[in-house]
Image (cartoon, rainbow, N blue to C red):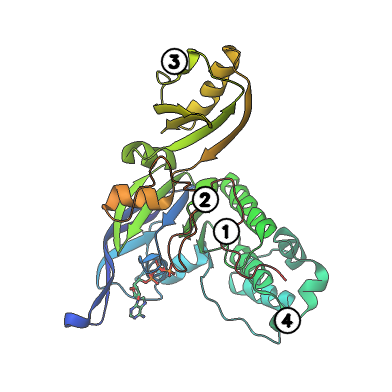
Amino acid sequence: MTAIRTRGLTKRYGSGDDAVVALEGLDLEVADGEVFGFLGPNGAGKTTTIDLLLDFVRPTEGAAMVHGYDTQEETDAVRDRVGVLPEGFDLWHRSSGYRHLEFAIASQNGDADPAALLERVGLDRTDGRRPVGDYSKGMLQRLAMAMALAGDPAVLVLDEPSGGLDPHGIRTMQEIVREEAERGTTVFFSSHILGQVAAVCDRVGILDDGELVTVDTIEGLRETAGVGSRLVLETAGEPDDAVDDLSGIEGVTDVTRDADGLYVSYTDPRAKATVVHRLVESDTAVLDFDIEEATLEDLFAAFTGTGTIAGPDSDSTTESAPAGDVVIEDEGSLEADTEEGDR
Ligand SMILES: Nc1ncnc2c1ncn2[C@@H]1O[C@H](COP(=O)(O)OP(=O)(O)OP(=O)(O)O)[C@@H](O)[C@H]1O
């Protein structure tokens, strides 16, 4: 079954010359049980899409279905099946975390144990008894995640779920996404941070200026765009002729070397292990290695013809993005987007 299906979904705010096209003709299908990453920079239309799926706003054109239910005609059936962690949310400052969870469980006709939900998101019983007005940004985000899970949803919609979370919180959030995926929950994960989406998602859609630019796996995106990542190896002495063989490895697109090391560009991440294996086989001592991942900016540039593609000499993983822009982050890193973090 298709968990989410949209056809020509369009949202314009205002009219005439002042109209803002938030979303333009979105045709999207997310399979049941899939973890789908919805990527795009600020203002791309991600939150608008989520608002349309939940009938918080009405489309200008087009339609959407969630688990076979029309989002406009069968809104209650849709909302019964969806747990949502919205980007911005208001809570009752004087009420405790427990009260919020009890409310969320009751309103979603769930039977979850509030204490277990708190524990799952990394909050303890003492936290649960405190008024949420005293919570840090990261604690609020964790509570909001617990509330999204309260009704044991078939579809979990996460809009920028890592906001305010520290690295441990981000890891917890990713673990929850994986656990939910194992239970068969469909996860719709909206973010402007490639690394976080790449860490958990089966497929990714890139939204740019209201339009869906492409849908694929992260590897597929890299391959299509030809903006692979790069393995930087420090070796003891000059690697011998075996280096020449590296260019023949499937997925490797370029091999260069200079006095500082050996640089192997690839579009298929599985090529990395083969490269290292070949070097070891040829008795080349690998002293250190680093991976420079292609960034969302690289992928954007390739798919939209905008931005700049990081050249071979740029250190794409350490570049810092301006506020509000795509956050560039290594897939394995958990350090980004933690302006405030947990207190
Ligand atoms: N209620 C509204 N009235 C007018 N314009 C709106 C409204 N809501 C959203 N927009 C506009 O629609 C566009 C898409 O906004 P949206 O919030 O969906 O983007 P987003 O991808 O979720 O961005 P972010 O990552 O910043 O949350 C933006 O240009 C935004 O200004």
Viewer-proximal residue, 206 or 334?
A: 334
Does the beta carbon of the residue at mark 3 sit less than 8 Å from ligand 1?
no
Q: Earlier in the sequence, mark 4 or mark 1?
A: 4
Residue drawn at (29%, 49%), measured in percent from left and top?
Answer: 303
The secondary element bearing badge 4 is classed as helix
**Which of disc 4 and disc 3 is earlier in sequence?**
4
Residue contact between numbered discs 2 and 1, judged by CB atoms under 8 Å: yes
Residue that mark 3 sits on: 245
In front: label 4 or label 2: 2
Q: Which residue is mark 4?
A: 134
How far apart marks 4 and 1 lie (CA) works out to 24 Å
Which residue position is annotated with label 2?
195
Q: Position of residue 35 (x, y in %)?
A: 49, 49
- Viewer-side residue, 239 vs 175: 239
Tell me which amino acid carries mark 4. Answer: Asp
Q: Quadrant of residue 245?
A: top left
Please tell me which residue is depicted at 66% across the width and 62% down the height of the picture: 166
Element class at badge 1? loop
Q: Is residue 216 left or right of residue 88?
A: left
Between marks 3 and 2 in the image, the one whose residue lies nearer the viewer: 3
Considering only vertical position in the picture, is 274 above or below 46?
above
The residue closer to the viewer here, 312 or 146, is: 312
Question: What separation in Å lies between label 3 and label 2 (alpha carbons)?
Answer: 31 Å
- Tell me the quadrant of ligand 1: bottom left
Residue at the far bottom in the pictured view: 94
Q: Quadrant of residue 122?
A: bottom right
Q: Amino acid at mark 3?
A: Asp
Work out whether mark 3 precedes mark 2 in sequence or the reverse, and give the earlier one. Answer: 2
Q: At 69% across and 70% down in the image, what residue appears?
A: 139
Whole-number angstrom distance, CA of label 4 to CA of label 2: 31 Å
Q: Earlier in the sequence, mark 4 or mark 2?
A: 4
First in sequence, mark 1 or 3: give its number.
3
